[in-house]
Amino acid sequence: MAGRGLALAFSRGLQPQAVDARMALHRDEFCVGQTPILLLCFTEAEAEYLRKSGGYVVGGSPGGFVLGSMYSAARLTGNIVGNRMRKAKAAREAAAQWRPVDQGTLYLTNRRFAVQGQSQWRDLWFENIRMSDCDGHAIRLEMSGSPSTALQVHNPDYWFVMFNKLAYDKVVTPPDPDAPA
């Protein structure tokens, strides 16, 4: 709703207004707002699984012999099935998906999304953004030289409308969430 209201105001001539920000700005750069953020990237991860083995050898004759029992066969089968399940789970966990990278404060300027994270700053310059979208939950960015990035913020449609006005001088109207699909 906030994004639709902002888009309407922009279509009637309102321009983004600078606000004070506790960050360094470049020449001719101004900040229009800040909000808490969870920064996500679409990446793979490394995952491990515990591989169990079973069976045993009992010595008794020269060279020993394999002791076969229903118990050890069932245990071995259980280990094989368990190994397959653990390996499949590890593969699912390692598959590419949205993963939290950092959280902190997002500052939107007329040139970048600046994220003051827990341990470092991340600047997402508009000139590096190749595609952008907002699904009502996050602003998704495709950037040159970076994995897909999502900015999870309160009222993402508001920030998406503001970003488009600042970056492209374009008024984008988010879809009406109450409209039939």
Image (cartoon, rainbow, N blue to C red):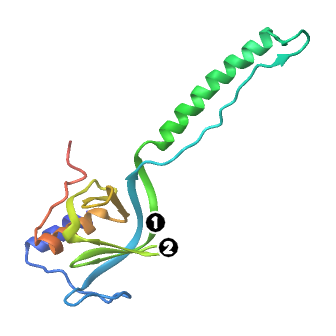
Q: Relative to 166, is 149 above or below? A: above
Query: Residue drawn 40% across and 63% down?
Result: 39
Q: Disc 2 marks which amino acid?
A: Gln
SS at badge 2: loop
Q: Position of residue 35 (x, y in %)?
A: 37, 74
Which residue is identified by label 2?
118
Given contact means CB atoms under 8 Å apart, are the residues at marks 2 and 1 in contact? yes
- Pointer 2: residues within 10 angstroms few (<14), some, or many (20+)? few
Q: Residue at x 59, y 33 (%)?
A: 86
- For the C terminus, the image quarter is top left
Q: Nearer the viewer, residue 160 or 180?
A: 160
Label 2 or label 1, whichever comes before in sequence order? 1
Residue 102: mark in rendering: 1
Q: Residue at x 78, y 15 (%)?
A: 72
Give the SS element for disc 1: strand
Where 156 falls versus 120 (above or below)?
A: above
Residue at 25%, 52% (x, y): give it: 177
